[in-house]
Image: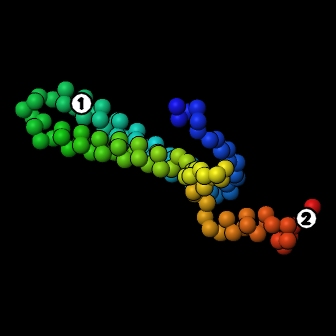
Amino acid sequence: MYLIVRKKCEVTYFMSQQAQADRTRKLLIAGGVFCMGIFGFIASFVIADAIDRTQWEGLIPVPFIVSVVLFILGIVLLMVFQNTIRIRKHKDGRFWLKGFCNEYLEMLRDVSHPDAAGYTQ
């Protein structure tokens, strides 16, 4: 039902090269943490299978726990860094956006008004 009655809002915005580079770096770090979690998870099972059970009593839980924490942390970081601009609310045909800094919003307010300095037709 939600997919039928929901309101749609498409936001187009541009990011500076520095902002794009920062976002890419954050996503690569989050992806690396996620992959390390998966690799550690698989490696802990390979190690557990390769050695005798009497020898790994205290060894395997530590890499396994660390890999699970890295995996979950990677998922959380990927979700946080994925979208920079979010639509938070819709009411009476208006959308509330989250993710813009105050300086950027002030700049938009200044240039959107016809009486603002620098406005040309």
Q: Which residue is mark 2?
A: 120
For residue 100, side relative to residue 26 (left or right):
right
Q: Nearer the viewer, residue 112 or 78?
A: 112
- The amino acid at mark 2 is Thr
Q: Residue at x 64, y 41 (%)?
A: 8
Q: In the image as oriented, which residue stretches furthest toward the front?
A: 92
Mark 1 Cα shell of 10 Å, populated few (<14), some (14-19), many (≥20): few
The x, y position of residue 84, in whole percent, is 57, 52
Q: Residue at x 35, y 41 (%)?
A: 71
Q: In the image as oriented, which residue stretches furthest toward the right?
A: 121
Q: Is residue 46 above or below residue 18?
A: above
- The amino acid at mark 1 is Phe
Q: Is residue 116 above or below residue 27?
A: below
Q: Which residue is mark 1?
A: 45
Q: Nearer the viewer, residue 31 or 5?
A: 5
Q: In the image as oriented, which residue stretches furthest toward the left?
A: 54
Q: Nearer the viewer, residue 103 or 9?
A: 9
The x, y position of residue 79, in whole percent, is 47, 45
* Position of the C terminus by quadrant: bottom right
For residue 58, side relative to residue 87 (left or right):
left
Q: Are marks 2 and 1 in contact (CB under 8 Å)?
A: no
Q: Secondary structure at mark 1?
A: helix
* Residue 99 appearing in the image: yes
* Residue 29 appearing in the image: no
The x, y position of residue 36, in whole percent, is 37, 41
Q: Is residue 32 above or below residue 98?
A: above
Q: Please, which colouring scheme is shown? A: rainbow
